[in-house]
Amino acid sequence: MQFPYSQAPATRSNGATPLIPCLKHLYLGGNVIKTKLVLAAAVLFFSSTLAFAQDGFFSSWFNRVDKTQSEQPHWITPVATTTPRLEEEVRYDQDWLQHVDGYTWNNYDGAKGLELIPWYKIELILQAPPYYNYSHDPSQTNGSGDLAFLVKYRILSGNEQHGNYILTAFLGWSIPTGTYSNGQVTGANSATITPTLAYGKGYRNFDVQGTFGVQIPTSNESANGRNYLWNDTLQYRVAKKLSPEIEFNTTHYQDGEHAGKTLNYITPGLLAGRFKLTKRVGMTIGGGFQIATSQFYRNNHNGIFTVRFPF
């Protein structure tokens, strides 16, 4: 999840409120939700169009996607941790962050978006700018976050019949389009780059997926700070379409407002899917509850809802 750097409690920071208040606030992110609905409709059109393509790059698109994914494990993507697997999907996340001052911060979209596999072993993620609503917190101003991108390159992999493992390199970057200091960093307005190594290993119905990365501002690092991000997820498939999990999310802050501090979360979660919608398009839904385990935190008892439409 993308959140303004000065406010970011961890690699993935969210907040929890009871269900009815959460639904009451959903209309505030209406434009973001409408955008994702348009993307979902575009996926249906895109998949249908490619199915009837005659030749060239686009006609072999899904053959390329299927071959790429057949050579990697078929685990489900965690609630918060970015999977090392290559995916092709549209994704929307909704996050509720319970601030220590008693305010509920709402993150519409969670910096998710469109994920594509345009080339063999390569995935491109276009992360739509999230929208932040701080529920009348006088210290913050509602607004949109940064536009961001992520490229994955799968280095090694074996599916369930060939070792059940994966190793992938990420390179993420953000463009400082956020309003009212709602970008990934505060202080001097800055883009960021985030090189990351992602890994995973499975055994029967159990798997571990993790990432380790460094978020580096491209300017004024002493003010904006450098973040070290480490996430690990333990999953167990108890039924064909049901996977409980527990995630460990850590951020260490170097320089910047929170210099020298480390933030830890434990995030139990549950995912259900993939449910078939059409011959090509599916749906996966899930959620998690983030609990701070470090002395330093600004948000605690944070809720996550996620829905994905793989195709």
Image (cartoon, rainbow, N blue to C red):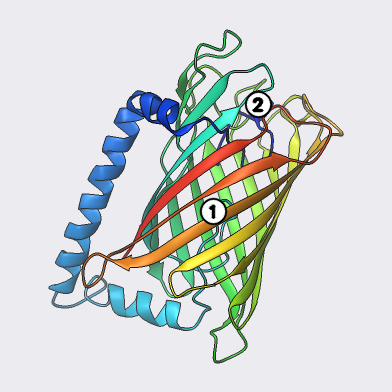
The residue located at (68%, 39%) in the rendering is 10
Is 279 situated above or below 215? Answer: below
- Helix, strand or loop at mark 2: helix
- Across and down, in percent, residue 160 comes to 55, 86
Residue 214: give x, y in percent of width and height.
Answer: 71, 48
Front residue of 142 and 273: 273
Residue at 47 percent across and 44 percent down: it is 305
Residue at horizontal 60%, vertical 24%? 189
Mark 1: which amino acid?
A: Val
State the CA–CA distance, disc 1 to disc 2. 21 Å
Spot occupied by residue 124 in the image (x, y as percentages of width and height)? 44, 58
Q: Nearer the viewer, residue 70 or 95?
A: 95
For marks 1 and 2 on the same chain, the one whose residue lies earlier in the sequence: 2
> In the depicted view, which residue is nearer to us: 47 or 300?
300
Neighbour tally class for label 1: few under 14, some 14-19, many 20 plus, Cα within 10 Å: many
In this orientation, which residue lies closer to the viewer: 302 or 210? Answer: 302
> Which-is-in-front pick, marks 1 and 2?
1
At x 57% / y 33%, what residue is drawn?
Answer: 15
Q: Quadrant of residue 191?
A: top right
Q: Disc count in the image? A: 2
* Label 1 secondary element: loop
The disc placed on residue 79 is: 1
Q: Residue tagged by mark 2?
A: 7
The N terminus lies in quadrant: top right
Compared to 263, does 31 lie above or below? Answer: above
In the image, what residue type sits under mark 2?
Gln
